[in-house]
């Protein structure tokens, strides 16, 4: 009888430990929806911006740099802001 109770206690403790380890694991963040590809798709696919220009902008180091690369080539402000937001938000 004592052996069965001990075995049950050990199994229960193991289950609690396993569930605690699973619960304390760092949550996995969802894949980033936006990024370089989304910026390129929007700029080239939606607004027919030259691919080389869109690439330079979407690959820029900051939102502001991306924005001004597009604006210097007379891309409308709203289009430039949206494309760059896709890349940097």
Image (tube, rainbow, N blue to C red):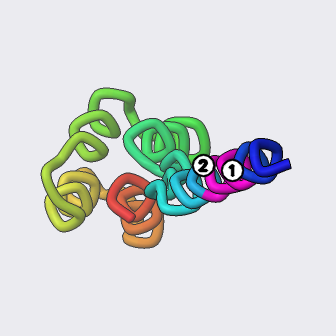
- Taken as a whole, is the magenta stretch helix, strand or loop? helix
Vertical arrangement, residue 45 with respect to residue 26, above or below: above
Horizontally, is 63 left or right of 61 in the view?
Answer: right
Task: Please give the residue where the numbered disc 1 appears in the rendered image.
Answer: 15
Q: Does the magenta stretch include residue 54?
A: no
Task: Please give the residue where the numbered disc 2 appears in the rendered image.
Answer: 18
* Callout 2 crowding tier (Cα within 10 Å): few <14, some 14–19, many ≥20: few
Disc marking residue 37: none
Residue at 47% x, 55% y: name it: 25
Q: What is the magenta range? A: 9-16
- How far across and down, in percent of the image, does residue 79 sit? 46, 62
Residue at 33% x, 59% y: name it: 88
- How far across and down, in percent of the image, does residue 81 sit? 38, 68
- How far across and down, in percent of the image, does residue 26 sit? 44, 57
Horizontally, is 4 left or right of 33 in the view?
Answer: right
Indicate the secondary structure of the residue bearing disc 2: helix
Does the residue at mark 2 contact the one at mark 1 (Cβ under 8 Å)?
Answer: yes
């Amino acid at each position: 009888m004592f052996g069965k109770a001990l075995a049950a206690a050990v199994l229960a403790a193991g289950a609690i430990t396993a569930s605690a380890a699973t619960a304390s694991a760092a949550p996995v963040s969802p894949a980033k929806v936006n990024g370089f590809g989304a910026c390129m798709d929007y700029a080239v696919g939606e607004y027919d911006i030259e691919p080389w220009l869109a690439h330079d902008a979407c690959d820029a180091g900051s939102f502001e740099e991306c924005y001004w690369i597009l604006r210097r080539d007379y891309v409308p402000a709203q289009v430039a802001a949206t494309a760059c937001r896709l890349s940097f938000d």
